[in-house]
Image (tube, grey):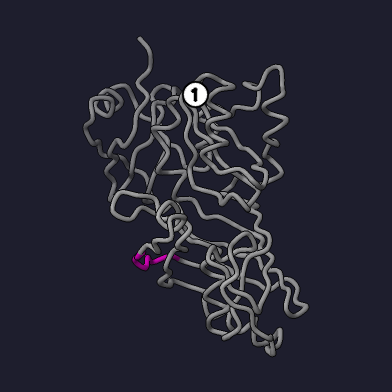
Amino acid sequence: MDGLLILSKPSGLTSSQVVEKVRRRLRTKAGHTGTLDPLARGVLLVLLGKATRFSWIFTELKKRYRVRGRLGIETDTYDVEGNVLAEREVSVSCDQLREVLQSFRGEIEQTPPPFSAKKVGGKRAYRLARKGVMPLLKPVRVKVYEIELLSCEIPHFEVEVLVSSGTYVRSLIHDAGQRLSTGAIVTELIRTQVGPFGLDAAVDLERFLKDENPGRFVVPVEEGLSFLPAVSLDRFRGERILHGNPVPLQEEGEGYVRIYIDDLFVGVGKLSGGILKPERLIPPKT
């Protein structure tokens, strides 16, 4: 079975655990496109079969979150589930919090949480942290496109953010707490959107697992990639593309595109300077 599954992950499960449940239910190859913390709930994209060939496209999509946090406390996981490291009195205002949050807008350097899926020396950071070995994680460049303080009743607050792939919201809240000298943790985290895929299009994990025909929730590969522009090739240029060769194309624009040959979807290419190069293909059956 090939395609995209738009799931609503419940809190309490890891992304890998969700994927394993899907794999067993559908008996097919599966993989997710971006880790969602066990505490978090919300949109989790799972690719099935040949759709896994396009995982990098889905992984790079922007992600939107709603996060509830609390000032005046620090934990080793940067969220409510961790061990408390410090508690402080909070004397900052909502305006100060808003100002600090806005300072993260744009491209920033961010250090992932010690309890994260990042690898250090070939081992997951959270595995080292659980053993009491605090991993030395390198800062990474990420982008915060939008950040808005939705509500604030000190010490509690709620924020909505739109961020690039690889951004840790827990680190964002932790770093805000550090700048305010109060500490801060995440108490609730919801991923509301991944690229064009929102919670309104997602199916609850339990509903999917219990359905007599769970395959009906699978979105075909072509439809799942419909947010990319499409180009159509004649047979001559189509044959060259299918053999891995670039072809000239009088199309405006740059970036990834869906490729069609005689109205048949065959994969994804990258358009640059009027040249189309194949990236990942699903050759038509002959």
90, above or below 232, in the image: below
99, above or below 48, in the image: below
205, above or below 84, in the image: above
Q: Quadrant of residue 232?
A: top left
Quadrant location of the C terminus in the rendered image = top left
Q: From this viewpoint, is residue 112 visible?
A: yes
Q: Nearer the viewer, residue 165 or 72?
A: 72
Q: Residue at x 66, y 63 (%)?
A: 67
Magenta range is: 136-142
Left or right: residue 95 compared with residue 107: right
Left or right: residue 230 compared with residue 160: left
Q: Residue at x 53, y 36 (%)?
A: 46
- Residue type beneath disc 1: Asp
Other residues around mark 1 within 10 Å, as few (<14) / some (14–19) / many (≥20): some
Q: Quadrant of residue 114?
A: bottom left
Q: Nearer the viewer, residue 57 or 256?
A: 57
Q: Residue at x 54, y 42 (%)?
A: 15
> Residue lying furthest bottom in this view?
91
As helix, strand or loop, the secondary structure at mark 1 comes to loop
Queried whether the magenta region covers residue 137, the answer comes back as yes
Please give the count of numbered marks on the rendered protein. 1
Q: From this viewpoint, is residue 165 visible?
A: no
The x and y percentages for residue 278 are 29, 35
The x and y percentages for residue 23 are 53, 26
> Residue lying furthest right in this view?
153
> Residue lying furthest top in this view?
286
Q: Report which residue position mark 1 lands on.
A: 2
The x and y percentages for residue 187 are 68, 63
Queried whether the magenta region covers residue 112, the answer comes back as no
The x and y percentages for residue 69 are 67, 69
